[in-house]
Image (spheres, rainbow, N blue to C red):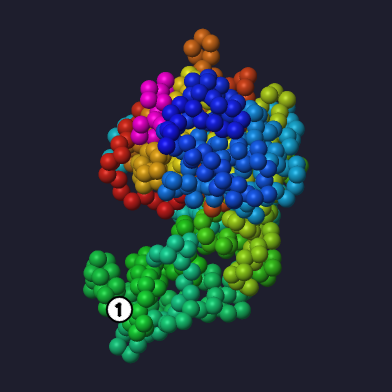
């Protein structure tokens, strides 16, 4: 069959590779012929899209099919079915915008509606520009402990005097005068480096400030990572027999009816079990006790399954991490991602007597993670602000700053109101999950949410901002892919990323490099090295030969951090090359969302994108300086064969 080398009939035009590279702004310039294709693959791909979208017109089918072919997604590829489904579940609006820098078009209601219900918009004007004031008032805070200790080669980690945790505590005290709405992945170390934050929240609760919260729970199928819906009984010979039936938990936050099986209290067997563990600890090391518990302590039902092995592992974890002095405050049948979520839940709900009054709720369903780390503040005069960014409310992220991070505070009512609308949906929105326990009071999370927040904000001084929440708003296809496709020859894209993955993003960056864009990426040395990361994925990665050009005029450099903590950023800037050879940064992206399929399609996340085409904003310059002078020189080049440890669980 005839092979197509540098031409590809896309239904709209037949553009050569050179022609398409020379027009990087137009939507049709996406369609670079990336590799040799059998002639019939264009027709076969179009037929596959038409079959999936039988009611969509031919011209729209052609645009989607052309995009798929341009990035090498044809039915003969092993990843075609998965990627086609994912793309059609997403916003394909960027394919229908003549200019991928046209935020108004990108935020319009999609020309072809996503197939997933969670991405079908509840209103027609959610993407319409909202006039938000004269200028964007924004404060930003980078963690410094990671760099100071790496640079000075500290043998013992030295905590900075003014940490982001202390800054956050100050903002809680000054900004949260009347109300606070907290969407927090987790909190830990409340007796140590995070005590300032926890104490500031406690002061507000005690003072009667209306304080609300939603937080993540853990259901990962590992020790201390699933609801403890099991019981056990002590036998006459001192062993423990595991129950063969699941317990129906009572999920009331306050005054549960079934106190023995209350979800937010210790299991009824905990005290006796920990008493016995304390006796064992008098004659055994932790290593020996762990071995004994896993092998000899527990009697499993005759029909032994993995669930009983998991229960034994969980009970062993409890024995090694809890004791009679702390279990009532720190142990419950519900598992949390962070050690002190339970205390925060109880603190926020402490002023109330009935479950209906509870103001701190947990996520449901447990699939994915509620990965946000934002707080909406309201002052006595009604003005609102929002704290967000990449920084978990935790020791390593802001308490001792061993991880690199960026936190922001936006003082703007319109933007804060969008965050508040997202919070309200999670706190008390409709959740139609058939499996949701009847006793659990909470809102909508993950795929139970719907797009219902305003996304696009404009300012008199030319600044624009967009806010997207995962998984409903699809920041990958509305923001990230168009951002990369908008890059022109000579431009510089800096990306600092905890974990990034996804076939479309790899192809978009390779296309940009073929057009002459320079890309620099600093990954976390654990999470960024996963099998599906941008530089390791088998179906396409950044270290392979560029499929769009044999000798690309741009470049991509991928590094991984060398400091002991994590590179926890999810931050990027796009800098335009000027006529005099200098650079001016136009766009910055900040948020909790890792640039991954999990971050975009499953988790609850947020992403803030800020642009000013005439003035380089301070936060952009500050990030570039942080990247160029600290992160980049503190990292080293990656290779596909690099030996790495298992990644942390966050995605």
Residue drawn at 68 percent across, 49 percent down: 55
Quadrant containing the N terminus in the rendered view: top left
| Nearer to the camera, 326 or 403 | 403
User: Which residue lies at the image location 36% right of the left edge and 44% below the top edge?
Assistant: 538
Q: Position of residue 62 (x, y in %)?
A: 60, 38
- Residue 393 position, x and y percent, is 51, 48
Mark 1: give few (<14), some (14-19) or many (20+) Cα within 10 Å: some
In the displayed structure, would residue 348 be above or below residue 127?
below
Q: Is residue 544 magenta?
A: yes
- Report the number of numbered marks: 1
Residue 460: x %, y % from top left: 73, 25
- In the rendered view, does 474 fall on the left or right side of 565? right
Foreground of the two, 83 or 56: 56
Percent across and percent down for residue 489 are 49, 20
Q: Quadrant of residue 150?
A: top left
Q: Is 569 left, or right, of 470 in this rendering?
A: left
Query: Which region is colored magenta?
Result: 542-556
The part of the image, by quadrant, that contains residue 57 is top right
User: Quadrant location of residue 380?
Assistant: top right
The answer to which of 580 and 544 lies nearer the viewer is 544
The single residue placed furthest to the top in the displayed view is: 580
Residue under the point 30% across and 88% down: 237
Q: What's the magenta bit mostly, secondary-structure-wise?
A: loop
Q: Which residue is mark 1?
A: 297
114 lies above or below 620: below
Helix, strand or loop at mark 1? helix
Decide if residue 492 is in sight here: no
Res 185 visible: yes
Looking at the image, residue 366 sits to the left or right of residue 416; the answer is left
């Amino acid at each position: 069959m005839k092979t197509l080398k540098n031409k590809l009939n896309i239904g709209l035009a037949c553009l050569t590779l050179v022609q398409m590279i020379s027009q990087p702004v137009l939507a049709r310039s996406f369609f670079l012929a990336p590799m040799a294709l059998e002639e019939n693959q264009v027709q076969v791909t179009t037929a596959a899209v038409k079959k999936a979208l039988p009611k969509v017109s031919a011209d729209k089918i052609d645009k989607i099919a052309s995009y798929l072919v341009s990035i090498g997604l044809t039915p003969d590829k092993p990843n075609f079915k998965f990627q086609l489904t994912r793309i059609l579940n997403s916003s394909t609006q960027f394919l229908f915008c003549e200019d991928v820098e046209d935020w108004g078009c990108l935020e319009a209601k999609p020309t072809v509606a996503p197939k997933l219900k969670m991405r079908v918009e509840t209103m027609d004007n959610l993407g319409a520009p909202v006039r938000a004031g004269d200028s964007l008032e924004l404060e930003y805070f980078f963690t410094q402990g990671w760099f100071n200790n790496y640079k000075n080669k500290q043998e013992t980690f030295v905590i900075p005097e003014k940490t982001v945790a202390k800054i956050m505590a100050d903002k809680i005290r000054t900004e949260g005068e009347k109300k606070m709405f907290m969407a927090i992945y987790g909190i830990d170390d409340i007796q140590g480096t995070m005590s300032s934050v926890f104490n500031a929240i406690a002061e507000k609760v005690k003072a009667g400030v209306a304080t609300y919260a939603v937080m993540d729970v853990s259901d990962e199928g590992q020790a201390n990572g699933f609801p403890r819906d099991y019981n056990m009984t002590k036998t006459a010979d001192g062993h423990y027999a595991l129950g063969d039936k699941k317990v129906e938990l009572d999920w009331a936050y306050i005054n549960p009816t079934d106190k023995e099986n209350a979800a937010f209290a210790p299991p009824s067997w905990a005290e006796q079990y920990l008493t016995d563990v304390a006796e064992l600890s008098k004659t055994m090391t932790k290593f020996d006790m762990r071995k004994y518990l896993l092998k000899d302590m527990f009697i499993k039902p005759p029909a032994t399954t993995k669930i009983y092995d998991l229960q034994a592992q969980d009970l062993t974890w409890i024995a090694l991490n809890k004791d009679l002095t702390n279990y009532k405050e720190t142990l419950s049948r519900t598992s949390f991602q962070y050690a002190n979520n339970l205390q925060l839940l109880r603190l926020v709900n402490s002023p109330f007597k009935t479950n209906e009054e509870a103001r701190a709720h947990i996520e449901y369903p447990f699939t994915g993670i509620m990965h946000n780390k934002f707080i909406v503040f309201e002052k006595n005069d009604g003005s609102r602000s929002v704290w967000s960014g990449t920084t978990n409310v935790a020791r390593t992220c802001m308490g001792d700053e061993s991880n690199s991070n960026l936190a922001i505070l936006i003082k703007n009512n319109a933007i804060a109101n969008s965050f508040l609308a997202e919070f309200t949906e999670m706190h008390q929105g409709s959740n139609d999950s058939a499996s949701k326990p009847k006793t659990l009071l909470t809102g909508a999370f993950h795929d139970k949410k719907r797009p219902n927040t305003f996304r696009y904000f404009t300012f008199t001084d030319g600044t624009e901002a967009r806010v997207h929440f995962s998984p409903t708003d699809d920041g990958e296809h509305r923001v990230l892919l168009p951002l990369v496709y908008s890059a022109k020859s000579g431009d510089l894209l800096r990306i600092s990323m905890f974990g990034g993955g996804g076939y479309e993003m790899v192809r978009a960056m390779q296309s940009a490099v073929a057009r002459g864009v320079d890309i620099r990426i600093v990954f976390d040395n654990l999470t960024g090295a996963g099998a599906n990361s941008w530089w390791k994925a088998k179906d396409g990665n950044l270290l392979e030969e560029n499929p769009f050009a044999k000798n690309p005029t741009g470049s991509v450099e991928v590094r991984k951090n060398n400091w002991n903590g994590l590179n926890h950023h999810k931050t990027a800037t796009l800098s335009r090359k000027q006529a005099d050879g200098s650079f001016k940064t136009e766009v910055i992206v900040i948020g909790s969302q890792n640039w991954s399929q999990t971050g975009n399609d499953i988790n609850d996340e947020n992403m803030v994108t800020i642009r000013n085409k005439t003035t380089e904003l301070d936060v952009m310059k500050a990030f570039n300086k942080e990247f160029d002078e600290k992160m980049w020189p503190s990292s080293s080049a990656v290779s596909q064969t690099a030996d790495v440890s298992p990644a942390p669980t966050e995605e």
